[in-house]
Amino acid sequence: MKKVMKWLSSGLGFEKQSKYVNEYFFRANMRASIYMSVVVIVLEIWMIIRLTNTIITNHLQDNFMHYFEKYYINYIILLVSGIMMLVFSLRYIRGKTNNHGVGQCIKWIFTFVCIYFGIKISMNDYAKGEQILTFLTMELFSMCLLTWKPLAAFIISGGSYLYFFIRINDMVAVNTGEVGTTLATQINFFTMWISTMMVCVANYNNTRLQALKDENLEQINAYLSKISVEDELTGIHNMVYFRSEAEKVLHYVITDKENILFLFFDIENFKSYNEKYGFQAGNELLIKIAHMIEEAFTGSLVSRFSDDHFVVLTSVEGAQNKVGQLSGEIKKLQKEVHLELKCGAYKPADDKADISQACDRARFACNSIKKHYDRTLRYYDKSLEDKFQLKQYIVNNIDTAIENGYIKVFYQPVVNTEDSSICGLEALARWQDPNYGLLPPGAFIEILEEYRQIYKLDLCMVESVCRDYRESVESGEPFVPVSLNFSRLDFELCDIVGSLCEIVEKYNVPKEFIDIEITESALTDQQDFLPNAIKSLRSFGYKVWLDDFGSGYSSLNVLKDYHFDVLKIDMKFLTGFDSNEKTRPILENIVDLTKQLKMVSLTEGVETKEQFDFLSHIGCNRAQGYLFSKPVPIEKLREKIAAGELRVSKEYMH
């Protein structure tokens, strides 16, 4: 019922229209008025000329006043109103005026003059026994070419039809010789009025629907235009706008190229803020910070880069002070979560700077001081340039490195605490590069993760380990189970489980010789694919380890929600082993917990005999660390075993 009432309300013109729809109606009427007024003006000039010619030809000059009062005055009034309507409509369409009040007034005057003219002429015609076509023409002309709200149309047409009917009903009909209209005339008259109203209502609703359609299209176009240059969340400019405008700034003749500075801002600990207070509060914080940066750098180019990152193109002068003040203001916004503003700055060496590269370098400078709470701003300099070049080199050459065998597997032994024999190995990647020499994992792992290329490295490691197993078996060398580190991104970027199975089958490696390590931090992202992947790995016969236990805040939840075969205790627990009295009871309780959960315990970072003896005493199953061996190539590992420095567990000896 409500829908029907709403439909009737809008269809009959009672619903309030938007400014756009009202403007659409007004403009449509002004366009129609141009055609109407031109026709009226031409007709009235023709009627005046025709009447004048008749008077002159028939020598009726003596009755001029009679014709003037009866005809000329009506022609002139209609002609003047038509000229007024035409002049205003043309001025409006050309943008010379936008006075709706004056336009509506002239439109009403023009309409009433047209109808009045139709009534006057048709009354004369009716008295002579002729058709009332002038009235009907003017009625349709003014009520149907122009668009009226149904209520206004009802009042105007109803009033004019009624008035005209009353007038002719008091007259003697030529065809009957009696006063009043015939029944047929009354029926025809009423039918004509109904037809006029139906056309008015249909015309109004067609125009309204087209206006709403155009309004919707305008809104969509406006929205698309807005989001093309504006960040949807914060309301400041986005990177599309930034790149476009920054390009222009760098090429302006008047731009002082020596004073240009790119800034990259990162809100440190924003993720923790989001997790603690929710995304709504996080979004509100981002909006506030975005406008704080925009206000601090008024007149500069400010945009949201992504997430909690922002970029600014500004002048060198005063930038450092502004960053410092902004950092202080942002610290005031923090609650229980410590918020820290980090800023990287890059000054282009010449005016041919690439915008994306400039932002990337400023970002690189910013990332270099993350977790350094004593620093807010870092300029991109020569030392960072070298690191940046290495970063670009790694991203660009990972495929070449894998293809040419530059990625090497280094093995670090895992020993049994009962007899100190090797019961496992951890496979660690090293990059033996012809230009940079031996690169440690810290030089390329995070970069490959950042650029989502890490899966290539991890698949290469799986292939190398399986190849080493096959070569060892065929040459009669002992080989123990190897654990491989998988990144969270591996499960997201490729079918890592399927690829693992294919490679293992290719080299005919028993499943019990391949273990998979997954870091605790990877499980805090609550991605749906990780629980399924872990279940899949275990169903195929692989053991799954929880790596770096204790490095995050959700360790107990992870143990509750997932099933692991081995718990690898983070090396940080052994830091301060001799001086921190809390270390030993914590380790003892963790080991007891693994026993209750039927898991194997392994502690990494073991460097002293005292640490190893303690772990053995509390029942920790396995240990790993420099006390036994650093990560070494498989050839070096075999040499140590041959020299008696390391001993392989009996169960893996041929």
Image: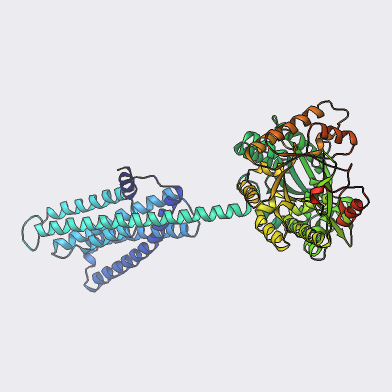
651 w.r.t. 549: above or below: below
Residue 508 location (% of width, % of height): 72, 61
Q: Quadrant of the C terminus?
A: bottom right
Q: Nearer the viewer, residue 467 or 410?
A: 467
Residue pictured at 54% horizontal, 53% vertical:
222
Residue at the right extreme of this rendering: 643
Residue 185 location (% of width, % of height): 13, 59
Tell me, what colour scheme is on the image?
A: rainbow
In this picture, residue 200 sits left or right of residue 431: left
Residue 413 location (% of width, % of height): 84, 47
Q: Nearer the viewer, residue 182 or 429?
A: 429
Q: Nearer the viewer, residue 110 or 443?
A: 443
Q: Is residue 316 visible?
A: no
Residue pictured at 21% horizontal, 56% vertical:
193
Q: Quadrant of the N terminus?
A: top left
442 w.r.t. 620: above or below: below
